[in-house]
């Protein structure tokens, strides 16, 4: 955006999300300091520009959150919608370089550009540029990408920067053979926190919800929504807190047979459990035999 007058002596603008000023006359280089001149801080123009910067930050975060939802849920996204939002810098930053898939097998590649009324330019894992015209596309969860390692290698080679964590996302593949009676995973149990409140704070900081005695994540997969739950104890009866078993079900704490959990719900649940476990103190870290 351009420079705006702020009184008679200065002009202001947003530079990398921060309000900066320059003299209204003389050298045109902006004043690149952490703070504005004292006489400008409370001017209406500066306040409005700061509010705009805050709105732009919220808008960018909302775009990332929406695209992340599309990916985790593997929801079909109309190509025409991508064409409509692509000119918006925040949407473009969230979408560019993501791996997207068309409606037919083999239509997979990095999203490089979108043209009206909905033609996508993709780059394949071998570096070829193709144009995709499809009614809808998906942003596949990485656990669903059979050539994930090849795509990761291509992304590193091309210097692709994804605004939404897709290829860099930690994935856990569901074991091919599970005990038919298994309803819980105990791989990430017994990480100790000094209090329930510290454990719940880590869960919310990671983007998960805390419902009673559980940290939860809702995952929509193939038309069904499951809630992955990690038991975290009771703040009223326990002085400390530990990560407990991971289960999946329709509600927090429910436990359907693990064999009925889809690959995305499995991976996302394990990802949550691993992240909560990593923040605690384990027996090995404490030096316990």
Image (tube, rainbow, N blue to C red):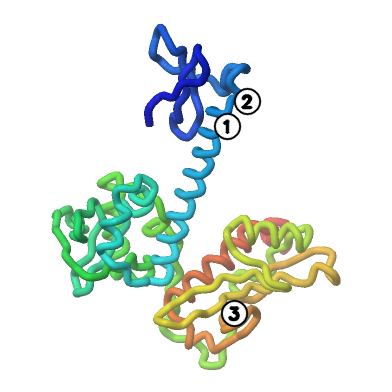
Relative to 212, 149 lies left or right: left
- Secondary structure beneath label 1: helix
The residue to which callout 1 is attached is 47
- At 51% across and 28% down in the image, what residue appears? 19
- At 64% across and 78% down in the image, what residue appears? 252
Q: Are marks 2 and 1 in contact (CB under 8 Å)?
A: yes
Q: CA distance from mark 2 to mark 1?
A: 7 Å
Residue 9 percent across, percent down from the top left: 50, 12
Which numbered marker is on residue 42? Answer: 2
Residue 211 percent across, percent down from the top left: 68, 71
Give the quadrant of residue 159: top left
Residue 115, above or below 69: above
From the viewer's side, name the closer residue of 279 and 120. Answer: 120
> Which of pointers 2 and 3 indicates the residue nearer the eye?
2
- Secondary structure beneath label 3: strand
- At 40% across and 60% down in the image, what residue appears? 67
């Amino acid at each position: 955006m351009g420079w705006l007058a702020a009184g008679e002596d200065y002009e202001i603008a947003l530079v990398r999300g921060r309000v900066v000023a320059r003299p209204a006359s003389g050298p045109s280089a902006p004043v690149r300091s952490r703070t504005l001149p004292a006489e400008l801080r409370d001017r209406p123009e500066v306040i409005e520009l700061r509010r705009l910067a805050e709105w732009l930050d919220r808008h960018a975060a909302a775009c990332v959150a929406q695209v992340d939802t599309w990916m985790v849920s593997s929801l079909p996204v109309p190509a025409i919608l991508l064409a409509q939002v692509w000119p918006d810098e925040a949407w473009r930053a969230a979408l560019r370089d993501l791996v997207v898939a068309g409606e037919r097998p083999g239509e997979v590649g990095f999203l490089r550009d979108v043209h009206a009324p909905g033609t996508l330019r993709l780059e394949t894992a071998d570096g070829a540029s193709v144009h995709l015209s499809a009614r809808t596309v998906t942003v596949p969860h990485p656990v669903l990408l059979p050539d994930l390692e090849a795509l990761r290698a291509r992304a590193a080679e091309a210097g692709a920067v994804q605004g939404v964590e897709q290829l860099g996302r930690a994935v856990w593949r569901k074991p091919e053979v599970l005990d038919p009676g298994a309803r819980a995973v105990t791989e990430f149990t017994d990480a100790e926190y000094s209090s329930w409140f510290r454990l719940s704070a880590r869960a919310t900081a990671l983007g998960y919800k805390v419902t009673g005695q559980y940290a939860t994540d809702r995952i929509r997969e193939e038309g069904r929504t499951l809630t992955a739950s990690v038991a975290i104890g009771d703040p009223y009866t326990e002085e400390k807190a530990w990560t407990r078993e991971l289960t999946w079900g329709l509600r927090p704490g429910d436990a359907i047979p693990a064999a009925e959990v889809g690959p995305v719900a499995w991976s996302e649940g394990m990802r949550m459990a691993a992240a909560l476990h990593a923040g605690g103190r384990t027996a090995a870290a404490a030096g316990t035999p």
